[in-house]
Image (cartoon, rainbow, N blue to C red):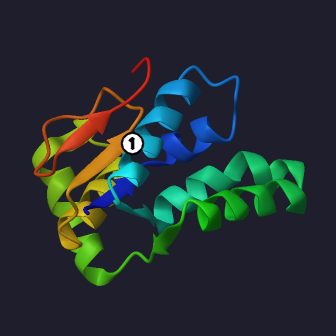
Amino acid sequence: MGLIVLDAGVVIAVLDASDVHHGAVMQALADAQASGDGFVLPASAYAECLVSPSRSGPQAVATVDQFLDALPSRVEPATRAIGRVAASLRAAHGPGLRLPDALVVATAVVLTADRIITTDARWPVVPVTVEVVGAG
């Protein structure tokens, strides 16, 4: 049993069957669930996941929450410690690691997660195992 931090692209891909990453993400989450892993979504990634559904209305937002509850996962608040680590990561990696991604990595570092699952293959090497799923 491990702890997995999810990037926003993972949740977005799960909820959109036409997303190029959908099948690979569904498989990765099923495999992790079968292993008994737990899931965390950083508050920053949660907000990112809700942008498009918020344009569509309350039912679309509720669909995201229903998925997260069914997974099950928890939304991790952005704490001072997470902010500090994210700033350090940004300082070390510059524009190669955008702030939203640095917050995901920082959440994994602070929580000592086993890995991050993302659909973004452009991340630099970070101090946490990163599993890139889908077309990248």
Residue 117 position in % (x across, y down) = 35, 44
Between residues 65 and 96, which one lies in front from this camera angle?
65
Relative to 117, is 60 above or below? below
Between residues 45 and 133, which one lies in front from this camera angle?
133
Q: Residue furthest front?
A: 34
Q: Residue at x 39, y 42 (%)?
A: 31
Residue 44 shown left or right of residue 4 in the figure? right
Disc tally is 1
Residue 3 position in % (x across, y down) = 29, 63
- Residue type at numbered disc 1: Asp
Image quadrant where one finds the C terminus: top left
* The quadrant where residue 4 appears: bottom left
Count residues near mark 1 (Cα–Cα under 10 Å), then give few for <14, some for 14-19, many for 20+.
Answer: few
Of helix, strand and loop, which one carries label 1? helix
Residue 21 shown left or right of residue 33 in the figure? right
Relative to 46, is 82 above or below? below
Relative to 4, is 43 above or below? below
Residue, disc 1? 31
